[in-house]
Image (cartoon, rainbow, N blue to C red):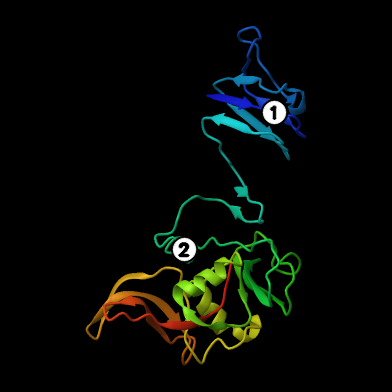
Amino acid sequence: MLHRLSVLAAILTISATPALAQGGPEGTGIQNIPFETIPSGVDLVGPGGITLDGATLVTQPLTVQGIIESTTGGIRFPDGTVQTTAAVPLNAGPGGSALYDNRIPDLTPDQAYSEVCFKDGRVQVDSHPVAEATAGGSCEPGDLGWIIEKDERPAATWEAARVQCLLRGMRLPEPFEWRLSCVEAEAFGLHDMVGNWEWASNAPTPWVEANGVSGTSVSAFGSSGCGHGTQSWLGSSDNAAETRTFRCVL
């Protein structure tokens, strides 16, 4: 396995099993050398691989021919999301059939919202009456959970609702997120969760037939209660396209 390191500076030590620095005597082992002392362009070659131990800062491109393994912790992205698996749920949405793994993002939404997270053995919530950062409070960026807008947005077709959320770096809720938010609306500080239909899924059902009409539909909830659900047309054989209120989540 060849690891090409093009690095100007870092704050750590590389611990490598016996390896050969290109240009050195064959069989020369390299052990515990400061990362910043490795000249740019040096190749480290060895069957045992390279271990980075500690908080490593890489400021230049790092090219690896082989497998990068994270044994603990996963990968943290710039928005604060920690990803521990690359597995995708069957419906390609965070509320799919796989274990729920959505994370609180590190951002400032453009309007009032609530954070819902699962930590310390219970459901916790932070209510934000104004647009402010998700950092701080009981729920922190990287925690398992989601953020959801307090107020519903005006009715729109499903695709138009998705576009409005995407323009804010957000999405529509999945049924699990919407239902729990509705049932706990008072505790979560959410408004008008019932009384009309809201879009409650990013994943359309490819084929539905009802009353002689067939087409593609999307879950909607809330007309007369949190448990009142239906399928609303995204497009159908009689050219129907319904509009529903909605709220964005992430």
Number of other residues with Cα within 10 Å of mark 1, as a class: few under 14, some 14 to 19, many 20 or more: some
**Residue 85 in the image: x percent, y percent?**
52, 50
Residue 88, image quadrant? bottom left
> Which residue reaches farthest front?
239
> Residue shown at 61%/45% (left/top)?
72
Viewer-nearest residue: 199 or 176: 199
Towards the viewer: 76 or 183: 76
142 shown above or below 2: below
Q: Secondary structure at mark 1?
A: strand
Label 1–label 2 contact, CB within 8 A: no
View extreme (top): residue = 25
Tag 2's secondary structure? loop
Q: Earlier in the sequence, mark 1 or mark 2?
A: 1
Residue 166 point in image, percent of width and height: 55, 66
Q: Quadrant of the C terminus?
A: bottom right
User: Residue at 48% across / 66% down in the picture?
Assistant: 95
Read off the residue under disc 2: 93
Q: Amino acid at mark 1?
A: Ile
Amino acid type, callout 2: Gly
x and y percent of residue 127 in the render?
70, 77
Residue picked out by circle 1: 14
Task: Answer left or right for 234 relative to 114.
Answer: left
| Place of residue 20 in the rendered image (x, y in percent of width and height, measured from the top left) | 62, 15
The image quarter in which residue 10 lies: top right
Kindly indicate the quadrant of the structure image that contains residue 142. Answer: bottom right
Q: CA distance from mark 1 to mark 2?
A: 38 Å
Taking the spot 38% from the left edge, 80% from the top edge, the residue there is 241
The residue depicted at 49 percent of the width and 50 percent of the height is: 86
**Which class describes the residues within 10 Å of circle 2: few (<14), some (14-19), or many (20+)?**
some
**Image height of 10 relative to 250, above or below:** above
Q: Nearer the viewer, residue 248 or 98?
A: 248
Q: Nearer the viewer, mark 1 or mark 2?
A: 2
